[in-house]
Amino acid sequence: MEVAKTVEELNPFVIANQQFDCAAEHLKLDKGMRDVLKSPKRQLVVSIPVKMDNGEIHVFEGFRVQHNIARGPAKGGIRYHPDVTLDEVKALAAWMTWKAATVNIPFGGGKGGVVVNPKELSIGELERLTRRYASEIGIIIGPDTDIPAPDVYTNAQTMAWIMDTYSMTVGATALGVVTGKPLAVGGSLGRAEATARGCQFVVREASAIKKIPLKGAKVVVQGYGNAGSIAARLLHEDGARIIAVSDSKGGIHNGDGLDPLKVLAHKGKTGSVQGFPGSDDITNEKLLELPCEVLIPAALENQIHLGNVDRIQSKIIAEAANGPTTPGADEILHKNGIFLIPDILANAGGVTVSYFEWVQGLSAFFWEEEEVNRRLEKIMKRAFNEVRGAAEKYNVHMRTAAYIVGVNRVAEATRLRGIFP
Ligand code: GLU
């Protein structure tokens, strides 16, 4: 019995389609519409030859998928990870489509990935890899066609290289081709914090509904990259106690609370959160099972699954990562009374401020950080309440509700535009 319980579908694209089908069922979409919305519009697979520092040439594999562009240009990050697969990128691209639609910003969904461990590359190798990849996908990206951004193990510097490579090809600086750029080359104030800040806004909404004050709340964060480390800092500022955090090497725990900024400095110095003074080591698996008020998975897919879901003790889960929970686990969390804020809502702050960055670049008029954060808060709160409303109306959990809101918008756009020719 125990064995059968843990055998579940873990292919992210199959999972993305299961999540979609669930909403499509509630929306009573016909088969033709379902097939259109499930099918990625374009999938590009590229070989990326790179001259390594030792003179050898290594060929890396890369992808760019445009899942749907019915509501606007494809939008979504680029991931560098040794385990990237085309199916994963297809899922991540689909999730971007539903995410942009759920928060109602005028983008479709796309995603890119390169099969590489960037930690094994020198900075020069990383730049050459990035520029060649940018050049290879240059035939489909552009300010009004497909706009990349950072994702796992890519950052503002990666975006600057892509912007420059694309700009050299077209012969003019194209600020709108990527978002998440450094401030000095057309980035937006607030973009670096945006994923975490959006997450903070929806956690505040959830904590009000669940009557769990954030002051003194125990918070656990899995993943200490851009999303996780800043979410920990912002919730700490809200008075929460960050009792455990982790990165790919493992986790740390201190029941009295960790100082997120000091942990970040330690990771900057040593390469990991592990060994932080005054903390005990904890595995990434055990960390998820700690009793707490708020759990923030901010790393990779499939972390909460049928094999561990019954041991999850958090009251609220906010998915800063994409796809951290399997569909089977979703049902059990819901049954166990755990309030889950799904990825396509909880981490939509990133793409929302990417939208602001894109608008600012195209209009050559840059906003103050206060305006960025105010507009972000408005969008996150509105989206949270719309999803909450759908959850009540359809009597479903928050993930299915978010899909209902997002899928409905893309279906409506598709219906209005019609099928060409
Ligand atoms: N990679 C982020 C995400 O998964 C941001 C995408 C973007 O800003 O386009 O939402």
Image: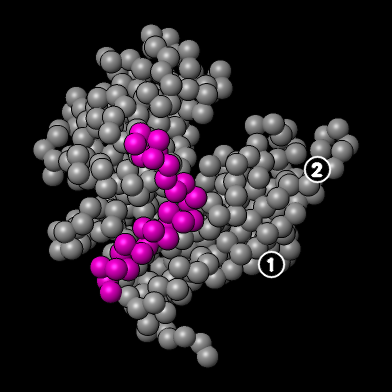
The residue drawn where x is 30% and y is 64% is 23
Mark nearest the camera among 1 and 2 is 2
Q: Residue furthest top?
A: 278
Assign a secondary structure to mark 1. loop
Q: Position of residue 328 (x, y in %)?
A: 33, 47
Assign a secondary structure to mark 2. strand
Write down the quadrant of residue 228 in the picture.
Answer: top left
Q: Which residue is mark 2?
A: 58
Rendered view: 383 above or below 373: below
Q: Quadrant of the N terminus?
A: top left
Q: Which residue is mark 1?
A: 139
Q: Position of residue 276 (x, y in %)?
A: 45, 14
**Numbered circle sitting on residue 55:** none
The residue drawn where x is 39% and y is 12% is 280
Image: magenta residue range: 1-28
N-terminal of the two: label 1 or label 2?
2
Quick check: is 5 in the magenta stretch? yes
